[in-house]
Amino acid sequence: MIQNHRASFINRVRQSLGPDIGPADVRRARIFPETSEKVSQNLLQAVQSRAPKERETLLAMLMDQAGPLHLHVTPVADPAEAAQQIAALVRQKNPEWGEKKSLIRWSHPLLDALDLESVLADQHIPVHTTAMDSQADLQGQRQLIRENTVASFMGITAADYCVADTATIVMKTHPHQGRAVSLVPSVHVAVITIDQILTNLTELYAVLDDEKNTPENGLTHHMVFISGPSKTADIELTMVHGAHGPKEMHIFVIRA
Amino acid sequence: MLPVFPEVTLFVQCMVDAMAPEAAMGMVRLFDRLGIATSFPEDQTCCGQPAFNAGYRTASRKSAMHFIQVFENAECIVCPSGSCVAMVRHHYLELFADDPHWLARAKKVGGNIFELTEFLVDVLHISDVGAAYQGTVTYHDSCHLLRSLGVGRQPRELLSHVRGLTLVEMAQSDRCCGFGGTFSIKYPDISTALVADKVERILETGADTVVGCDMGCLLNIEGYLTRMGHPVTVKHIAELLAP
Amino acid sequence: MDDPFTTEKYTAKSRQAISDKRLQGALADVQARLGPATQTMYSAQPEGAGIRQQAHEIRQRCIENLDILLEALADKVTGNGGQVFFANDAEEAVSCCLAVAKKHGVKTVVKGKSMVTEEVGLNQALEAEGVDVAETDLGEYIIQLAGEKPSHIIAPAIHKTREQVGQLFAEKLGIDYTADPAALTQAARAVLREKFLAADMGITGCNLACAQTGHITTVSNEGNIRMTSTLPRVHVAFMGMERVVATLKDHDILFRLLSSGAAAQKLGGYVSYVGGPGPEDYPDGPVAFHLIIIDNGRSRMLADPAFREMLCCIRCSACLNVCPVYGKIGGHAYGSPYSGPVGAVVTPLLAGLNRAQDLCFGETLCGACKQACPVDIDLPRMLRELRFRLAEGDETWSATPVSKPEKFAMDTFAWFTSHPAAYRAALFSASRMQALVYAKEGPIRQLPGPLAGWTRSRTLRKISSRPFRSQWKSRKQPS
């Protein structure tokens, strides 16, 4: 293996910063503040104490912002209605690759509650999940999940948060929740609840900052923000949806 | 009521002095009409901008020091060129950054210098100088004037009060004309491509006159217009405000 | 190793670009669409007009604590099971990547668009080792198929028309000719999907990195970078050492501005945070994550107070979309992965000042770039600084004076400007001298010697026979 030059590298950077930079520990304390500022505290307070009416306003804002991004946002009353809407989408859409229709979804309490398996039974659509059994052969399971994800024309996820101002869903990567579900299938459906909607990125980062030190909520090895379907304008600046990722994206927002 | 100025000291950019004296004469007439006394220190030469922008700071400092010596006792310096004012006001600070003595003197001069239209509109609060001009005019925003001094509104305000004048904005009026000092000599092809675009934008307006506040840009634009045979007149704003 | 720079061809390539009508149209189009829209996006931010200065301060503060941030980032990533390698130069960065590829038995690689991998010449090195490398950003894929170089940081194939792409795809992918962007995109989608699924290793750059939490971040609209960092078993990320910021919250403003600057968006379509490999009991994600942090000349910029500011750059390309010179000569003329105003400053600092002198002098200093920069970098100031080093010579950058005649001319002019009597005499004699050389009437049609280029397309007014200073003397005083 080749030589890693970390120490000399960092040292050169330090030298380049000049003699007046001050001791590293003092600078470290200054640049990574322990306590979060008052502004963030106020933002967190606002998020936690949001009234139902304000949530509806955020939902309306999300729908406004989503439109131009070709992101479809549909409010639904409850999980059952979300399941019906998804079933309708499944009926409507044709697979992009191959003939067979199948779905892949996260293993997640909200999605479990949709009971898509029963709802889609009459269409004879297989619904795969990305649940892992830590006792069984991990590599074999990963292989199977990959095959199922690639074969599925629709991927269904939940999310941690949704940002109204940018029409963004935020997904930290938790166990049993495949990253490729929101990426490889041609249609991505995200199901969220109305209380997950935040106002803007500033609010989101205040929340993420607050959670970063609690391992169970904290940032895992991976997190993704998604604002609409995949798109490109690389040929003569002409917008085309579906460059590599999903061509279509839907968010169902459960009001109850 | 005009604020009382004992005197305005004129700094006539070297290019205006040599190649567009009518612009500076316009400025003089303008101040005469407004009843403002003017003086012209005859030892003035060049602010040092050409050398500075080309990288020759030792040479530029020589010109700048001379400029400071000539003008440091003037209370109010007015110049019919935005880029020269930007040089004195902003870039002298860069030029003398490591020389506290000259930096202090440069700061003093830099605080007392104004570009002509900025002086009229922001300092004297005059937007109507009583001028008349029969014609359709389009205005070119010179880069340093607009971006370093923030002057774009002032010349337009002055033009809008000129009787008989119709102002037609060109598209991308703030796009560089391709002059850029030594740039236009070293990279004539790129410079030509830029001035060709500028002239196209000017012609699109149907204006018979193009006006600006910086002689460098205006000579560049005029040079291309003339060579191509387009009958559009190029005027420094001072010529138009006090013909 | 291949030299990524061809900066010596600036003038010749500029000329070529200016005479290419189709390219001129494409450049005008990209600037018209993105230039003004970016300004509108900035002013719509809730922080108001000061947001760019705020972002500048964030970046400046991070750069001034770069040693600490890099250590923290490396510790966190290592703690999450990732490998961090510090590469002093391009060669080390490339060999590290090759070693990782060898260790994991990599035969095929998919890549997300990354300027820094262009800078170190990674693709050629991988290909020389027999590794199949596929660029996956649509624009990058097009130019890879065409065997060309990127001409814009964000829209690398902007110089190609839909017809050219249609012919290229028909030839290289064996599809029926079409010039429909949607159909062409679909064709690339199908080919690249197979590549993503088959690839052993994914290589990406970084838009930013977060020291506090130990993540690198990537932004894309196509989703190719997510594919690249999700599907292959190994993910290697290349990062210029200046990309790291301190806290998660620094990302708020920076991502908003990056998205505005790059594509006039509120936020890029996909933003990914990657902090390490996925645990084995997770359903997917690479099992190995390597972060290669690159200096390659950046610490020299850090050490020079005049150029330290350049490290604040987030490579959004907003400056390209407003630069009048870029708008005429396009990206290829710069002979570097970094084109436009950012390239004009950063390329000489990476490739050598003298070698890239045309990039320093071949700009108009109009200042549009500074105004468009989301982190308010004073690019014109640094261009002037580069010119200064080149004009007068500079040891730290091993720059030698570019032109003795020009220096002589400037010194002479400066002498005259500081000797007013001589200056006056010179002015009047020049006015008289030109009467001997040029026709009596009308402007000058041809200037002599090195000035001749100016009058190829333009005429020039003569020096007045009565300069202002003589008119002033004889003017009538107002009564």
Image (cartoon, coloured by chain):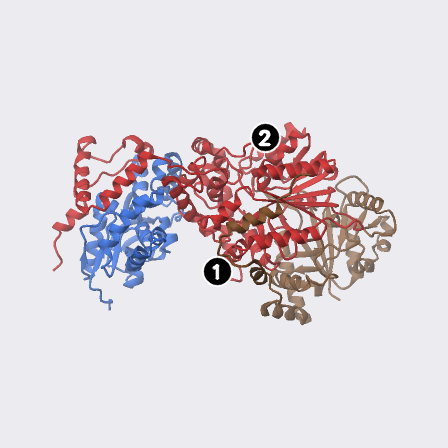
Q: Nearer the viewer, residue B129 or C118?
A: C118
Residue C470 picture location, percent across and down: 15, 47
**Residue at mark 1 to residue at mark 2: CA–CA distance:** 43 Å
Count numbered badges in the picture. 2
Residue identifier under label 2: C147
Residue B86 picture location, percent across and down: 33, 52
Q: Is residue A68 visible?
A: yes
The three-letter code of the residue at mark 2 reads: Gly
Q: Do tag 1 and tag 2 residues touch (Cβ < 8 Å)? A: no
Mark 2 burial class by Cα count in 10 Å: few <14, some 14-19, many 20+ = few
Do discs 1 and 2 share a chain?
A: yes
Name chain C's colour.
red
Helix, strand or loop for disc 1: helix
Q: Which numbered disc flags the more N-terminal residue, 1 or 2?
A: 1
Residue at 29%, 37% (x, y): give it: C408
| Residue B52: mark | none
Q: Is residue B243 visible?
A: no
The three-letter code of the residue at mark 1 reads: Gly
Residue B70, quarter of picture: bottom left
Q: Nearer the viewer, residue B42 or A191?
A: B42
Q: Is residue C391 above or below residue B85?
A: above
The chain drawn in blue is: B
- Looking at the image, residue C224 sits to the left or right of residue C399; the answer is right
The chain drawn in brown is: A
- Write down the chain letter for disc 2: C
Residue C466 picture location, percent across and down: 16, 43
Helix, strand or loop for disc 2: loop
- Write down the chain letter for disc 1: C
Residue identifier under label 1: C50
